[in-house]
């Protein structure tokens, strides 16, 4: 007795393949929807602080005639101090400050960040890191470290001075004026940081009127 031929597997599995294809299509559509929704959320709820900082950084890229190298270098970053003073510092902090004096900005950042890991509440270290970033014209990280120094110590005179200088580089003289006013309240009488920021502001006005 002759039996009917067996059906091939392809015909039996065709509905299953169609179902898998539909599932994959639905999954990719869901992923795409999530991405679109996330992008919309970011645009809708963008932090108000992001826009001015982005504008400052875009403006700084166009500021070829007003460079951080034009400002008078503050004495707090160039004075080595006595051997006894340096002996009291963390070795990486001391090494970072020596690198600042030598204008080895990348070396200073590397050493100072090691010191910051051991002493995260040291406003001096954060201020020095910010200064090195500013000299490298990396203004975003510079501002972050200056602000961190002021979170740790809101009366840190050098951080206020350097933040004021950074605002000048970013063509925000009114913000620099605010830092000068804060310094004048902190110092009561003229201090080195006040004098340095005033000198930087005078340089800025000269360059801005060229």
Image (cartoon, helix red, strand yellow):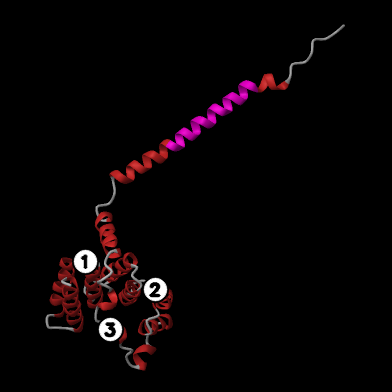
Magenta stretch prevailing secondary structure: helix
- Verify whether residue 27 appears in magenta: yes
Q: For numbered disc 2, what is the local secondary structure? A: helix
What is the C-alpha distance between the residues marked 3 and 2? Answer: 19 Å
> In the image, residue 77 lies at what x, y percent?
30, 82
Disc 1, disc 3: CB below 8 Å? no
Front-most of 118 and 184?
184
Residue 181 found in image quarter: bottom left
Chain part drawn in magenta: 14-32
- Verify whether residue 209 appears in magenta: no
Residue with the most extreme top position: 1
Residue with the most extreme front position: 210
Q: For numbered disc 1, what is the local secondary structure? A: loop
Label 2 sits on residue: 116
Q: In the drawing, does residue 206 fall left or right of residue 41?
A: left
Mark 3 or mark 2: name the one nearer the start of the chain. Answer: 3
Q: Residue at x 74, y 16 (%)?
A: 7
């Amino acid at each position: 007795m002759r039996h009917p031929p067996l059906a091939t597997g392809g015909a039996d599995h065709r509905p299953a393949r169609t179902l898998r294809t539909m599932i994959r299509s639905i999954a990719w559509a869901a992923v795409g929807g999530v991405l679109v929704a996330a992008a919309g959320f970011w645009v809708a709820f963008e932090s108000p602080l992001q826009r001015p900082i982005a504008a400052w950084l875009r403006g700084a890229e166009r500021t070829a005639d007003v460079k951080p190298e034009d400002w008078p270098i503050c004495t707090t970053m160039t004075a080595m101090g006595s051997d006894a003073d340096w002996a009291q510092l963390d070795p990486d902090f001391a090494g970072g400050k020596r690198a600042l004096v030598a204008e080895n900005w990348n070396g200073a950042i590397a050493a100072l960040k090691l010191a910051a890991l051991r002493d995260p509440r040291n406003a001096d270290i954060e201020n020095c890191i910010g200064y090195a970033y500013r000299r490298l014209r990396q203004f975003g990280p510079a501002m972050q470290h200056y602000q961190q120094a002021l979170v740790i110590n809101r009366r840190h005179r050098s951080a206020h001075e350097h933040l004021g200088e950074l605002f000048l580089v970013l063509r925000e003289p009114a913000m620099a004026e605010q830092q000068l006013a804060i310094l004048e309240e902190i110092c009561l009488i003229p201090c080195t940081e006040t004098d340095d920021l005033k000198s930087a502001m005078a340089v800025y006005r000269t360059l801005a009127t060229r």
